[in-house]
Image (spheres, rainbow, N blue to C red):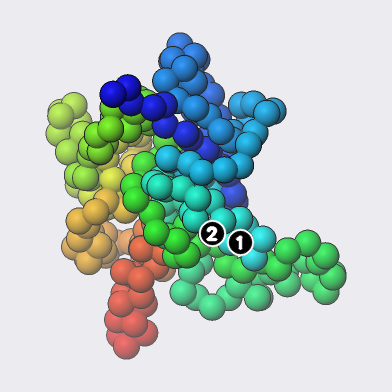
Amino acid sequence: MTRHSPKIGVYGFTGCAGDQLMILNCEDQLVDLFGATEIRSFVMAKSDNHEGELDVAFIEGSISTEEQLKRLKEIRERSKVMIAIGTCACHGGPQSMKLGENKFDEMYKKVYGNAKIAISKAFEAQPIDAFVKVDMYIPGCPIDKAEFLGAVTKLVAGRHPYLLKAPVCLECRWKENPCILYSGKFCGGPLTKAGCGAICPSMNLPCVGCWGPTDDLNASSEYNLLKEKGYRSEEIIQKMKKFGGAKMAKLVAEFDKKEAKA
């Protein structure tokens, strides 16, 4: 029995569209990708887009309006598998770094004042799994095209893709990079999901955490280590939340409470 070509849709919400551009940047493999799958919808790549049942939906961007939320739920209903691509879809992205502070209305008014907004009502940006079931996450800012192509190849073959679950520190060890964190710089490597190839530390630059939190992270240990090295609590928390979004916002809430009592 011949395996059918999986029906795929690629969609973007609140974000920079960098993950979709990265897919388009797979120039040498793009023809094979389109040949091995049936791309039903991908606005950035084709004009003849169709709605309908999907085997896999790739979603980029966080959700920040009621219209986006309605659209996301509609895509989820007709998709067998939903995959979040990019840090914004997986964790909320930089636009979610203020989650939990209850300042959205204040920030919104600073931008728009008393203007009457006729488009869909906005709310604080959140990752897509805050609203729908997500079957798989491919983080990155933007995603790594090799990791994306590997995942699609396995999906086409009917297998579940395997992605690294370790932190960036593992990739630093593989490359024999000296530890930037212990040199006194603020490095987010221990808290950040691997897969980027430790690009920044390999250039002697601290990891900024743009791939989002790793699956099994110890935020309190890094927080305490950085405090010992003289970093202010507010600075540590802000940097942890920059790409950590919803997951990191919950984890660092305890640090805020601890500092308030101190």
Q: Which residue is mark 2?
A: 73
Q: Amino acid at mark 1?
A: Lys
Q: Where residue 261 appears, x then y in whole percent?
A: 32, 88
| Disc 2 and disc 1 in contact, CB within 8 angstroms | yes
Mark count: 2
Q: Where, by quadrant of the figure, is residue 149 drawn?
A: top left
In percent of width and height, residue 191 lies at: 27, 52
Q: Looking at the picture, tell me which residue is in the foreground, 17 or 102.
A: 17
**Which residue is denoted by mark 1 in the rendering?**
70
Q: Is residue 84 above or below residue 204?
A: below
Residue occupying the point 65% across, 75% down? 105
Q: Secondary structure at mark 2?
A: helix
- The quarter of the image holding the C terminus is bottom left
What residue sits 50% from the left and 75% below the top? 101
Tell me where residue 124 appears, x and y as whole percent. 57, 67
Q: Is residue 52 visible?
A: yes
In the picture as drawn, the residue positioned furthest to the bottom comes out as 261
Label 2: how many residues lie within 10 Å, few (<14), some (14-19) or many (20+)? some
159 or 247, which is in the foreground? 159
